[in-house]
Amino acid sequence: MTDYENRQNWDIHMWPEMHAKLRELQKLINSAPPGPAINMMVFTVSSLVSGCRHCTAHGAYGLDRVGVSIEKIQAIWTYETADVFDERERVALDFGFAAGQSPSVVDATHHAALRGHFSDEEVRTLIATAACSGFMNRYNDALATVTDTESAEWAMANLGPLGWDIGKHVGADHERRPGAPRHAEHADRRRESTG
């Protein structure tokens, strides 16, 4: 099916110590102010501009799981003109879009805009989010990580109309995990927002 041979052997999950530390870092960043929704929007737009379809699918699906509407998730593709974002969210998305490019095009205007809407603590979180996105984008795109069935099916249904496709992340059946990565804080927030 693909020209990749046993690529799952290089997956981050095969390095348990690193995987555990990475999950810990992601949990810390995602839950820090300004909060999971904005942090994950920055992760998703950075992944989108970097071209990592695997991380774009996971970021968008993660937004769905924390209670962000499908309309708003889809609007990330046209955030500059979409009317579903407030100015604060748009500033964060501008920053994430600039930070996700290679080389980064973040400049003093992005810094000034961030200062107008976020505290120093929140800006540090947004920078950490973009940096974590960069690491995950490079690792998963270099490996051509096989996207799990759950995330891929969600992304095809909800992002496919925007032009997303799984590309090299499709994998053979034996390479594919059935479920998306689970984050307890996501499930808890989803229950709270729908409960």
Image (cartoon, helix red, strand yellow):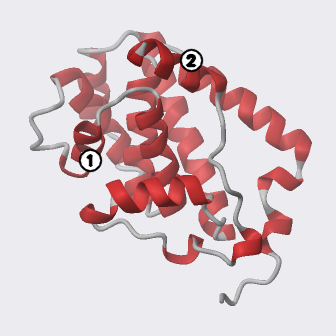
Image mark for residue 188: 2
Q: Mark 2 or mark 1: name the one nearer the start of the chain.
A: 1
On the image, the x and y values in percent for residue 115 come to 30, 16
Dividing the image into 4 quarters, which one contains the N terminus?
bottom right
Picture layout, residue 5 above or below residue 179: below
Give amino acid for label 1: Gln
Q: Are marks 2 and 1 in contact (CB under 8 Å)?
A: no
Image quadrant in which you'd find residue 68: top left
The one of 85 and 158 positioned closer to us in this rendering: 158
Q: Position of residue 122 (x, y in %)?
A: 44, 15
In the rendered view, tell whether residue 124 sits above or below residue 81.
above
Decide if residue 131 is on the left or right side of residue 194: right
Q: Secondary structure at mark 2?
A: helix
Q: Amino acid at mark 2?
A: Asp
Q: Nearer the viewer, residue 89 or 173?
A: 173
Query: Quadrant where the C terminus lies?
Result: top left
- What label sits on residue 74 in the rendered view? 1
Instruction: Write the residue at 70% across / 65% down.
Output: 176
Q: What residue is shown at x 64% (from left), y 60% (from top)?
A: 140
* Residue 19 located left or right of residue 182: right
Query: Is residue 179 found left or right of 108 in the rendered image?
Result: right
Identify which residue is drawn at 52% across, 33% down: 129
Residue 50, percent from left and from top: 44, 59
Give percent across and percent down for residue 84. Answer: 15, 32
Q: How many marks?
A: 2
Q: Can residue 101 be seen by looking at this rendering? A: no
The CA span between labels 2 and 1 is 23 Å
